[in-house]
Image (tube, rainbow, N blue to C red):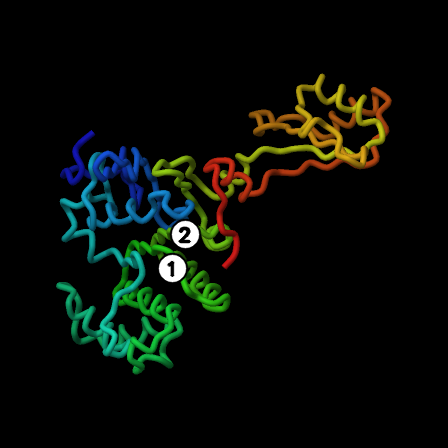
Amino acid sequence: MSPAGGTGSGTPGLTIETQGLTKRFGHQVAVDGVDLAVPPGSVFGFLGPNGSGKTTTIRMLLGLAAASAGTVSLLGMEMPARFRDVLPRVGALVEGPAFYPFLSGAGNLHRLDAAGPRTVPATRRARVNLALERVGLSHAAGKKVHAYSLGMKQRLGIANALLSHRDLLVLDEPTNGLDPQGTREVRNLVRSLARDGATVFVSSHLLAEVEQMCTHAAVMSAGRLVAQGPLADLRRAGHVRIRLVTPDGGNARTVLTRLGLVPEGGGVEPDGDVLLAGLGAPSADGGHLPEDIVGHLVGAGIRVRGFTMERESLEDRFVALTGEGFDVAQ
């Protein structure tokens, strides 16, 4: 593995790739050997509880913090060695926006755009107006930023990331401070950016946000990457359990145990009629078929009054991976 900031290129076809990415602060390991693989055109959710290492990872991706070990590649180019070629193609909102408080929203964007070495002055006004329109701030373009709410500042930060065409958008908690309507608008904006060909990398601790806008996700816990892939695959990887309603709980438990199913919580709930049993993670052949399980139960004389198979929710899956809870709503 080459040292961080080498001159090699990443795997062809990946917009973001890290290998063994690590960040230490003294004896503390904040990010521990992270291997990210973000495909082009995806809306990639970077999920984890607060303090799990998400923002530190993003800072290393963008060259804002030096990695202690490992490599980073953005758009097929090694970072930070190729930052002059990479960063003009990347829009970012990291750790909340910072603006000149006594300039207007439009005035801030004009100044920030003018600081870019490759921006085109002739199109600046049109690009600023379009960016403000896309985030719903046209009505507040002339208002001084010190009078903006937190949600409005967050929108202005996203507008800054959209001033020029970007192949990659990196958004750290983009819906922070937004009301439900604003959150929906940001979700729609993120989806539209992906439809236009950009890859959007969204860090969040809000599970519902990731579920509703993302195509792929990675899960961080205590500095380590514990899962990543298409969101549909992460859902399918969860455990399945059966819920059996029967007055013959004791005999049913015997049959389920013989089938290799494990009754949960000792088996029968207090009302004596409901039995829960875990199927475990799905096997390659699809695991136990519900009709086969019911057939064994009926064949053993068990009276089956109700039978359902319940898949572990995405929230349950992520809590199992991290051992911590996620916020599931704004």
**Distance in Å between CA atoms under marks 1 and 2:** 8 Å
Percent from the top left, x then y, of residue 126? 26, 76
Q: Quadrant of residue 269?
A: top right
Q: Which residue is mark 2?
A: 204
Which numbered disc, 1 or 2, marks the residue that appears first in the sequence?
1
> In the picture provided, is 312 more to the left or to the right than 49?
right
Number of the label disc, if any, that sits on residue 174 = 1
Percent from the top left, x then y, of residue 52? 37, 43
Depth check: give the residue in front, 113 or 89: 113
Depth check: give the residue in front, 329 or 265: 265
> In the picture provided, is 9 more to the left or to the right than 209?
left
> In the picture provided, is 282 more to the left or to the right than 73?
right
Percent from the top left, x then y, of residue 206? 46, 52
- Residue at x-position 21% and y-position 74%: 110
Q: Quadrant of residue 106?
A: bottom left
User: How many other residues sit within 10 Å of disc 1, few (<14), some (14-19) or many (≥20)?
Assistant: many
Number of the label disc, if any, that sits on residue 146 = none
Q: Amino acid at mark 1?
A: Pro
Depth check: give the residue in front, 115 or 11: 115
Say whether marks 1 and 2 touch (CB < 8 Å): yes
